Image (cartoon, grey):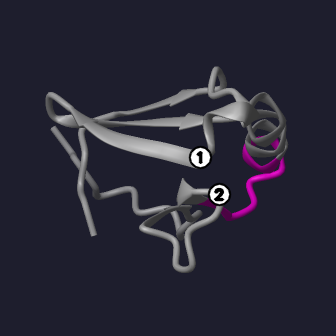
Amino acid sequence: VTGASFFVFSGALKPSSGYLAKSSIVEDGVMVQITAENMDSLRQALREMKDFTITCGKVDAEDPQEQVHIQWVEDDKNFSKG
């Protein structure tokens, strides 16, 4: 589990790259590179406030190296107060 100050989602990953998706730490945030098709699915999930999972790693890998889970949780109004 990684906590981050921000996330960047880039839809510029080419399907010919051989990766499902790639993630990397950028300063105190996380950048996730996904295909344009996966970006469309992510946008739709965000609009509908639905959980979404991005599997990272090589297309032909037996086990995914990482997964990025976007999970909606209950609203906590006392978080980061002040």
Quadrant into which the N terminus falls: bottom left
Q: Pick whichever, 57 or 32, lies toward us.
A: 57
- Picture quarter with the C terminus: top left
Q: Which residues are magenta?
A: 45-54
- Quarter of the image for residue 38 reads top right
Q: Residues within 10 Å of mark 2 (few under 14, many from 20)?
A: some
Q: Which residue is mark 2?
A: 59
Q: CA distance from mark 1 to mark 2?
A: 5 Å
Residue at position x 72%, y 44% in the image: 46
- The three-letter amino acid code for the residue at tag 1 is Tyr
Residue 69 sits inside the magenta stretch? no
Quickly name the residue at label 1: 19
Residue 60 location, x and y as percent? 64, 64
Is 66 positioned to the left or the right of 80 in the image? right
Please name whichever residue, 7 or 18, is drawn nearer the observer in this view of the structure: 18
Which residue lies at the image location 72% right of the left edge and 33% below the top edge? Answer: 16
Could you say whether the residue bearing mark 1 is in a helix, strand or loop?
strand
Q: Are marks 1 and 2 in contact (CB under 8 Å)?
A: yes
Q: Which mark is residue 52?
A: none
x and y, in percent, of residue 34 in the image: 62, 37
Q: Earlier in the sequence, mark 1 or mark 2?
A: 1
In the structure shown, which secondary structural element does the residue marked by tag 2 occupy?
loop
Name of the residue lying farthest toward the bottom: 63
Looking at the image, which residue is at 51% across and 71% down?
64
Say above or below: 81 vs 33.
Answer: below
- What residue type is disc 2 on? Val
Q: Position of residue 31 (x, y in %)?
A: 39, 34
Mark 1 crowd level (few <14, some 14–19, many ≥20, 10 Å Cα): some
Q: Position of residue 68 (x, y in %)?
A: 49, 59
